[in-house]
Amino acid sequence: MNNDFGIKVYRKKSNLKSHPLIFTIYIMGYIVGVKKGINRYSKYYNTRGDKVNLTLVLFHTLSSLLEDLHCIEMYLSKINVPVNSYSWKHYRNYIRHDIRDNLELYDDNRKKERSKIFHTNNSDLEFLLIFKKNNIVFGDTKIVLKLKDIKNYIKKVECIMNKNINDAKNFGLLKN
């Protein structure tokens, strides 16, 4: 017995000029990643143990979570879906580039722009990241990313993507 499974996406001439199905499938995959990331964050935040190792695990979890959110935001823009943006890209780049990759690049213009957003440009502070039970604090002005805001954002996106999938099934563009 074959246990392989997957999804088939068809191109079909119809009254639709284009269908956002392929981006919907990508987005749904990243939604799964965000949900797993939130669960992982909560699990490790509540774990007892070495704070240094837990901080590193939370840092990696947050980095992956922000990458997934940024991908969702990017694909939504490609299919012109109006969902309020939280500028996940700024958070993502703060973690993935300013902190991890570019500490030594003081003259990087993109980093300077983000340092204005996170208010790390007025002192010797390179970065500030504080993990709390229900949110993450960025920068020295206490910009807070709340887990409940991420969950609400994902619920809105998921509703739109479920409608896209149902539309695609109705038009014969998607078969299980």
Image (cartoon, rainbow, N blue to C red):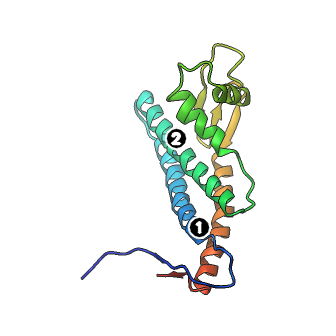
Q: Quadrant of residue 159?
A: bottom right
Circle 1: residue type: Thr
Give the crowd class for mark 1: few <14, some 14-19, many >=20 residues within 10 Å: many
The answer to whether residue 89 is left or right of residue 52 is right
Circle 2: residue type: Ser
x, y percent for residue 103? 54, 22
Question: Where 46 sits versus 52, above or below?
Answer: below
Q: Is residue 46 visible?
A: no
Return the residue at label 2: 63
x, y percent for residue 109? 66, 26
Front position among marks 1 and 2: 1
Image disc number at residue 24: 1
Q: Secondary structure at mark 1?
A: helix
Image disc number at residue 159: none
x, y percent for residue 56? 45, 33
Query: Which residue is pictured at 45% across the width and 29% down the height?
Result: 51
